[in-house]
Image: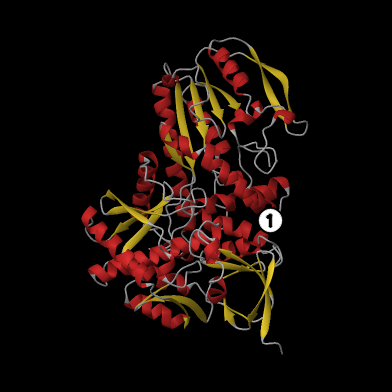
Amino acid sequence: MNDNIILTINNKTYEYPREMSLEEVSKEFMDSYKYPIILARVGNTLKEMGTTLSKDATIEFLDLTSREGNRVHISGLTYLIIYAVKSLFGPNANIYVQHSLDKGLYIETNFDLNEQILEQIKSEMQKLVTNDLEIARLTIDRIEAIKYFESVKDYAKAGILKYNTNTYITLYRMGNLYNYFYTMMPTSTGKLKAFDLTYIGDNGFILQFPTTYIPDKIKKYEHHPHMFSVFHEYREWAKIMKIENAVDLNKVVSSGKIADLIRIDEVLQSNRLLSVAKEISKNRDKIKIILIAGPSSSGKTTSSRKLSMYLRSFGMKIRPISMDDYFVEKEETPLDKDGKPDFECLEAVDLKLFDDQIEKLLNHEEVTIPTYSFILGKKEYKEKVKLEENELLVIEGIHALDTNVLTNIKRECKYKIYLSALTELNIDNHNRISTSDNRLLRRMIRDNRTRGYDVTRTLSSWKDVRRGEEKYIFPYQDDADFTFNTGLIYEIGVLKTYVEPLLYMVDEDDEYYEEAKRLIDFLRLFLPIPSDAIPDDSIIREFIGNSCFHAD
């Protein structure tokens, strides 16, 4: 048997001794990367850097500028903070990872925090990075791991492991501290140099790092008060309901009380939308246009139709308009950097026509509005519209909040609503549920149900969708008059029942196999929730079907 193996790296072949680790191999390639190599793709499979190689393979090394490497970097930084605070303030000191905020993570402490103390934590983290402390991967008996987490009073992690049927599970050790994460990890703290911490008050701070969208630097923190307030409001409600993590939700399912939770959550969401309708109704003399925007799969269609229904209940007349009907002709559609039609950019919209027609409508002039034919790739003019007295325009579109839209109309005439499916639920104290993942699961189900797309096709377009959101939607969220959370605390369990079979259809040789596997592993943490008790006007029905606002 040959003692050497052939590795293909960057389209070149190299010969290495068998059983050499990815870490050792990567040392020859580090100069080609801006940040430390943190992960590797061996064939189509992601591997931690401690993995040894026993056969010929094609390898792609990844740093934090890749989506997969960025996840590992964030998990490593989270562990680094946990270790630092316990080193400084004792074993009972802890952090609670809450949610994403301005390209970073909002984190709270269980001890008093101020700028000076946060600077201490940052200095301790930097010292640990310099010391290049090992992060060891361990295979542990699951029952023993549960006993360990119970002994350190981490009941959320102990509870999650009770829903895991594996005999052995993977823990990570940093010094004398053990932890359980749901991503792979770096091999040492020396790979975690790129971070910053910003204090924002009330025992809270932002963990910042380079991202796949801003890879060359750490973005200076910019506070988003609307988004922060909505997250805080929903977190407080989750505390009142005593459902703060996956274990809490699973207990509700196990106890047979999930239908009650669904009804309570749906009433809460409807009441919030109703309160917006009341505010608009009170200011009907001033407000002439409602503009609704949000990222993909945030529930724009259901939200706009449900809001319109509430407004009609106050005696208001509604005229819905979709910005999608104002796309430029197919041959005029701008191309992205890969030469593909870019329907996400503002230039894909016939803005001159849109602004002109909306202004004329508000002046009670008759216009022939377009309907865009995606089959023909052009606008068709069939419907003549003239607004009645006190009739309100409800406009939905990804660019609806863009300050470059409807500049010819006074700001006081507009009421802007930003939608986002924010997740108030966490996996445990140190592992959050990504809002982006939540929307991706929604989109997979809807794409499959309404368009017949498989998971791979949805995943192949997701990167472009996310890039468009970062550029054309998120920058305008602070200009909204109201930020509405379309996320539901119970929905992951419902989405699981619909999307899990689709994910299992992705073959091992598919380039998106690892992403499908990651989502399957994530969904395993949740018990399935039947959809029987979900009302037909629920936002989640927009994705799983049988919505009263959609013809399924």
Picture residue at 50% right of the left edge, 22% below the top: 289
| Quadrant position of residue 465 | top right
User: Can residue 529 be spotted in the picture?
Assistant: no
Where is mark 1, residue-wise?
456
| Quadrant position of residue 55 | bottom right
Picture residue at 32% right of the left edge, 72% below the top: 153
Q: Position of residue 366 (x, y in %)?
A: 62, 11
Q: Tell me how many marks there are.
A: 1
Q: Is residue 307 above or below residue 238?
A: above
The amino acid sitting under disc 1 is: Thr
- Give the left or right position of residue 329, taking residue 241 as reference: right
Task: State which quarter of the image contains the C terminus.
Answer: top right
User: Can residue 332 be spotted in the picture?
Assistant: yes
Query: 550 or 363, which lies in front?
Result: 363
Farthest-out residue, right: 376
Query: 87 or 520, which lies in front?
Result: 87
Colour treatment of the image: secondary structure
Query: 340 or 354, which lies in front?
Result: 340
Q: Position of residue 440 (x, y in %)?
A: 58, 51
Q: Is residue 1 above or below residue 335?
A: below
The secondary structure type at the circle numbered 1 is helix
Q: Is residue 363 above or below residue 282?
A: above
Disc 1 packing (10 Å; few <14; some 14–19; many ≥20): many
Picture residue at 35% right of the left edge, 40% below the top: 225
Q: Position of residue 525 (x, y in %)?
A: 51, 66
| Quadrant position of residue 53 | bottom right
